Amino acid sequence: MEQNIPQPLPGLFYERPTLELAGELLGCLLIKQSSEGLAAGYIVETEAYIGPGDKAAHSYNNRRTKRTEIMYHQSGLAYTYVMHTHCLFNVVSGGKGHPEAVLVRAIEPIIGLDLMSSRRLGHIGVNLTNGPGKLTKAMGISMEDYGHDLQSPPLFIARGRTPDSISAGKRIGIENSGEAREYPWRFWITGNPFVSRHQKGEELRK
DNA sequence: CTGGGGATGGTCT
DNA sequence: GACCATCCCCAGA
């Protein structure tokens, strides 16, 4: 059993502009407790979605449905949704009435590697968590976590490690979103092997 | 009522 | 790099 489980970050952590939050989440620990055990990893890749002006966001044009409802609530809640056969995990941002979110696209696993591997049907190494659908499967994150406050177990975010270097570039998988596809709103830890896809980026800081 | 369309991933060439 | 499994939502009729 793991000891010294870090404490959740306070609500105040999420009270900042979404683009800044997307960068600050890099290096933080994402932790999920379940009856099967504990799983945790460092967040290494994120994407910002800033509705209503962002054509790639689910909340574009203030679109408000059962799915996007949680984006209109306070920052720091979990926004999970199903894409094809996978569940994707976002952190609600922007504050009440501002439907924004940060998609977590990849993590570097730290705790519960065996559990993750079994949830991922035997996959190992980077394949465990180097994609938004893969990491939710490995972590045991599902639609049951929709709307959960990330300040408390079983799903929460804690302080981790400060990245040496951060890069930014275009977001992934939004080819059909007009000029929104050009926005450099994807962030990752430079050189981290768990980043989902290697693509041109600009180094922001070291 | 119906159908088009995904913020993906796995597998194959 | 291309193909498609799979499924629920919701816009439009």
Image (spheres, coloured by chain):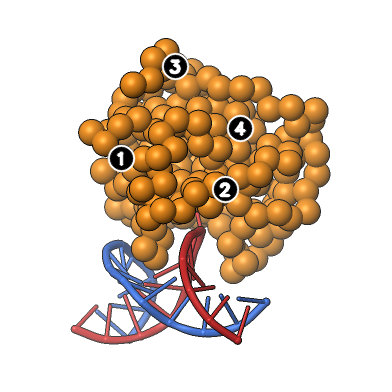
Chain colours: A orange, B red, C blue
* Residue labelled with disc 1: A145
Q: Amino acid at mark 4?
A: Leu
Q: Mark 4 and mark 3, same subunit?
A: yes
Q: Secondary structure at mark 1?
A: helix
From the viewer's side, name the closer residue of B8 and A91: B8
Q: Which residue is mark 4?
A: A26
Amino acid type, callout 1: Asp
Residue bearing the label numbered 3: A6
**Whole-number angstrom distance, CA of label 1 to CA of label 2:** 24 Å
Mark 4 element type: loop
Question: Quick one: label 4 or label 1, which is nearer the N terminus?
Answer: 4
Q: CA separation, marks 2 and 3?
A: 24 Å
Q: Tell me: residue A99, above or below residue A197.
A: above
Residue at screen point 54% across, 47% down: A125
Residue A188: percent from left, percent from top: 66, 41
Residue located 44% across and 38% down the image: A113
Image position of B5 with respect to A104: above or below:
below
**Are the two marked residues, 4 and 2, in contact with CB atoms closer than 8 angstroms?**
no
To the question of a shared chain for discs 2 and 3, the answer is: yes
The residue where tag 2 is placed is A126
Disc 3 and disc 1: Cα gap in Å?
20 Å
